[in-house]
Amino acid sequence: ETGVTQTPRHLVMGMTNKKSLKCEQHLGHNAMYWYKQSAKKPLELMFVYSLEERVENNSVPSRFSPECPNSSHLFLHLHTLQPEDSALYLCASSQDWGQGEGYTFGSGTRLTVV
Amino acid sequence: SQQGEEDPQALSIQEGENATMNCSYKTSINNLQWYRQNSGRGLVHLILIRSNEREKHSGRLRVTLDTSKKSSSLLITASRAADTASYFCATALTGGGNKLTFGTGTQLKVEL
């Protein structure tokens, strides 16, 4: 375990379903991130939260809705997804948003949309 | 092409050999980082080199940064089968907060 825990590890959902991905860290980090990793493509930054405030939204479709209720938890709510949304969704955290430093990643949620 | 591009895309070597991966980027950076990813898992941070640094070591890893050429290299010495993974470079742009932009990675296979 890296200190960043993602659940579930695997998720299969239909296009009309609503589901949520959960990320939890107890590293005392103030910044949290959602990335999408699709085959043969670079990691795509989706959202950034710093001190529970969203500071970056990378033109992500509204069918993805993030939530950061506190500095330790980050959610990604999913609804009416498309098959092309199937990917590995990675959560990461870092000490702060403003400083250049490394991320700690979770193991990811492998999402399959059918 | 994207901000960070790794070269080669795939590399296969024998255990004990050295592995070198390269990364090129396009715009001014605050720092450059290297990560490893085992199949289908999360990324693990390996090393960070700041824009005012030229070389950094961590165990069997050696990273260089040439800001004039906008390139970096990652050298893994005396490779082991356990080093088999994908390796990614990521750049933090100047004035871009801590947002990292990743390349597509180099797939390294170390054979016994």
Image: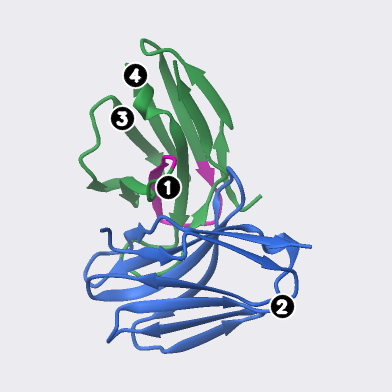
Chain colours: A green, B blue
Distance CA(mark 2)–CA(mark 4): 48 Å
Q: Secondary structure at mark 2?
A: loop
Relative to A33, is B45 above or below?
Answer: below
Instruction: Magenta stretch: give its range.
Output: A24-39
| Front: mark 3 or 1 | 3
Residue in view at x 44 percent, y 59 percent? A94
Of the residues under marks 1 and 4, which one precedes in the sequence? 1
Q: In the image, A89: left or right of A45?
A: right
Q: Which residue is mark 4?
A: A79
Q: Are marks 4 and 3 in contact (CB under 8 Å)?
A: yes
Same chain? Circles 4 and 3: yes
Seen in the image, is B35 located left or right of residue B67?
right
Where does the image place residue A97, in percent across and percent down from the top left? 33, 61
Give the amino acid at mark 1: Ser
Q: Secondary structure at mark 1?
A: loop
Mark 3: give few (<14), some (14-19) or many (20+) Cα within 10 Å.
Answer: some
Tell me: A9 left or right of B80: left
Residue B78 circle label:
2
The mark lying in front, picked from 2 and 4, is 2
- According to the image, label 1 marks what residue? A71
Residue at coordinates 21% horizontally, 70% vertically from top-left?
A: B95
Q: Identify the residue under disc 3.
A: A65
Q: Disc 4 is attached to a residue of which chain?
A: A
Above or below for B107 versus B29: above
Instruction: State the residue at coordinates (23%, 27%).
Output: A62
Mark positioned earlier in the residue sequence (3 or 1): 3
